């Protein structure tokens, strides 16, 4: 009889735990739905260019979108487990698809009713995130870091993607390593993380082995995701990149351009 009562009590606690979890998730969803971007400019992008760049917002739902849905679910689960909400997306070398991955990961997460996403172009030597959307911003992250301007002046909503905002890179900086590792940059990361409830902040960063920027910046974020190219990225280079990122939490790798 005692064992039955214990089993019933465990079942009751599990039900209550589920109810509490669902209640919290519903509350978060309502918080996100109530957010209105009154100061963030909305700029229409070039849909055809976005489609050419394989940006999810301009494409029909297909297996490509499903792949990013799986990726975004895994990323969110790992980050929620540790209460993290800032992520650097990088790669080992050039041309491995990190920017497309960062954009589509952000859009996929933003489609969840619980989250808002801010995507930041952290490639300050060669800022090009905005080009994927076909927009031409006047200011960006480099301007915020080097000048006295408000954050609201550099944030953009690209088109009509709900709960998705980008912070472009701005003018190229030759001293990008120092700027990305500066106290002002880390302070900005914390401000971006805490501005809205259930926000994910994703930074599109340069390749780890190309410049020191990502390694300099990595202590400012909770975790990192590394994009590798199928049949191109060398194992030794990947191991070196992971070792260089050891100052943050590497949550995994993404195999891109896989040949089936």
Image (cartoon, helix red, strand yellow):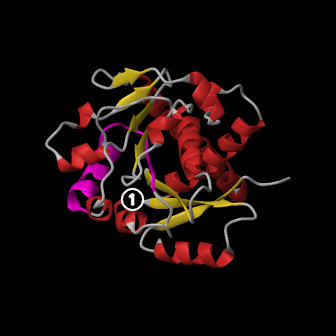
Q: Report if residue 136 lies within the magenta region.
A: no
At a point 25% along the width and 32% down the height, the residue shown is: 152
Residue 52 showing in the rendered view:
yes
- Taking the image as shown, residue 20 lies to the left or right of residue 153, namely right
Indicate the quadrant where residue 103 lies.
top right
At a point 30% along the width and 32% down the height, the residue shown is: 138
Please tell me whether residue 260 is drawn above or below residue 119 in the rendered image: below
Q: Which residues are magenta?
A: 182-205
Residue 47 in the image: x percent, y percent? 58, 23
Please tell me whether residue 218 is drawn above or below residue 126 in the rendered image: below
Q: Report if residue 188 lies within the magenta region.
A: yes
At a point 17% along the width and 38% down the height, the residue shown is: 149
Residue 20 in the image: x percent, y percent? 51, 39
Secondary element at tag 1? loop
Quarter containing the N terminus = bottom right
- Taking the image as shown, residue 13 lies to the left or right of residue 204, namely right
Indicate the quadrant where residue 232 lies.
bottom right
At a point 39% along the width and 51% down the height, the residue shown is: 122
Please tell me whether residue 27 is drawn above or below residue 86 in the rendered image: above
Residue 116 showing in the rendered view:
no
Residue named by callout 1: 221
Category of crowding for the residue at label 1, using alpha-carbon neighbours closer than 10 angstroms: few (below 14), some (14–19), many (at least 20): many
Front residue of this view, candidates 230 and 76: 230
Indicate the quadrant where residue 58 lies.
top right
Front residue of this view, candidates 27 and 184: 184
Front residue of this view, candidates 60 and 233: 233
**What is the residue that sits farthest to the left in this orientation?**
148
Residue 206 in the image: x percent, y percent? 46, 58
- Taking the image as shown, residue 61 lies to the left or right of residue 138, namely right
């Amino acid at each position: 009889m005692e064992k039955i009562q214990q089993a019933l009590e465990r079942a009751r606690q599990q039900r209550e735990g589920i109810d509490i979890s669902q209640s919290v998730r519903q509350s978060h969803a309502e918080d996100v739905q109530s957010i209105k971007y009154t100061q963030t400019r909305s700029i229409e992008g070039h849909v055809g260019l976005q489609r050419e760049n394989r940006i999810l917002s301009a494409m029909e739902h297909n297996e490509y979108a499903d792949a990013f849905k799986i990726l975004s679910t895994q990323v969110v689960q790992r980050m929620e487990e540790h209460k993290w909400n800032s992520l650097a997306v990088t790669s080992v070398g050039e041309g491995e698809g990190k920017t497309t991955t960062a954009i589509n990961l952000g859009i996929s997460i933003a489609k969840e009713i619980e989250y808002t996403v801010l995507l930041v172009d952290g490639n300050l030597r060669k800022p090009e995130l905005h080009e994927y959307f076909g927009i031409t911003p006047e200011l960006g992250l480099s301007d915020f870091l080097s000048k006295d301007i408000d954050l609201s002046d550099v944030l953009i909503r690209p088109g009509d993607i709900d709960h998705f905002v980008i912070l472009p890179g701005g003018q190229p900086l030759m001293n990008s390593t120092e700027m990305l590792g500066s106290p002002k940059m880390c302070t900005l990361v914390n401000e971006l993380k805490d501005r809205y409830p259930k926000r994910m902040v994703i930074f599109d960063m340069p390749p780890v082995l190309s410049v020191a920027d990502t390694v300099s910046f990595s202590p400012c974020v909770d975790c990192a995701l590394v994009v590798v190219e199928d049949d191109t990225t060398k194992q030794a280079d990947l191991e070196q990149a992971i070792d260089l990122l050891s100052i943050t939490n590497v949550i995994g790798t993404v195999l891109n351009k896989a040949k089936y």
